[in-house]
Image (cartoon, rainbow, N blue to C red):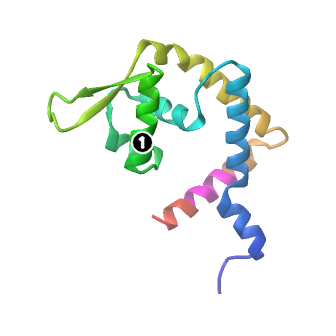
Amino acid sequence: MSNNQFKRGELYSVINGMASTAVARRLQKNFRLAGLEITIEQWSVLYHLWKQDALSQQELCNRTFRDKPSITRLIDNLEKQKLVKRMPSKEDRRINLVCLTETAKLLQDKTIELANQTMDEALVGVNKNEIEIVKLVFQKVYDNLL
């Protein structure tokens, strides 16, 4: 027997990621209010580059769960904003590495602060135990679908 105790509409809501969408919208709003001209999608690329600079486009695809055309478009737009630059890899000239500019490095602290503020807003009334349960459940769902 299935462990699925959801009604069809409730299951769709979970799959659709309503909470994730609400958090992304609020973070985008908080970026705008702070005068930052980057999208959530661009921020996700920058976030991974702040963790480890000079990643290949393929590695950015893997880390952000996006396809190659989407990453290419995001990097093109980040280049236009002078936040990243493409550099040929020294080991394999067929590979372009995406590198942060100084301008992008200056955005890190402010955007992380806004992301933390957004999560604080989202988690009002949610205790640490509840957060751990949600993380565990979502990890199991993710692992089941790999």
Measured as percent of width and height from the top left, residue 53 is found at 36, 26
User: How far across and down, in percent of the image, does residue 48 sit?
Assistant: 45, 33
Residue annotated with mark 1: 71
The spot of residue 123 in percent (x, y) is: 77, 39
Q: Quadrant of the C terminus?
A: bottom left
What is the secondary structure assignment of the residue under circle 1?
helix
Q: Going 73% across and 47% down the picture, which residue do you hit?
A: 129
Q: Main secondary structure of the magenta part?
A: helix
Name the outermost residue toward the right: 125
Which residue is drawn at the image coordinates 77% and 68% (left, top)?
A: 10
Left/right placement of residue 47 relative to residue 115 reads left
Judge by depth and name the residue closer to the eye, 96 or 128: 96
Q: In the current view of this chain or complex, which residue is farthest to the bottom?
A: 1
Picture quadrant where residue 98 is located:
top left
Identity of the amino acid at label 1? Ile
Which residue occupies the extreme front position in the image? 80
Instruction: Looking at the picture, tell me which residue is in the foreground, 61 or 128.
Output: 61
Q: Is residue 22 above or below residue 105?
A: below
- Whether residue 135 is in magenta: the answer is yes
Image quadrant where one finds the N terminus: bottom right
What range of the chain is rendered magenta? 133-140
Residue in the image at 63% along x and 51% along y: 135
Residue that appears at 15% across and 33% down:
93
Above or below: residue 65 compared with residue 60? below
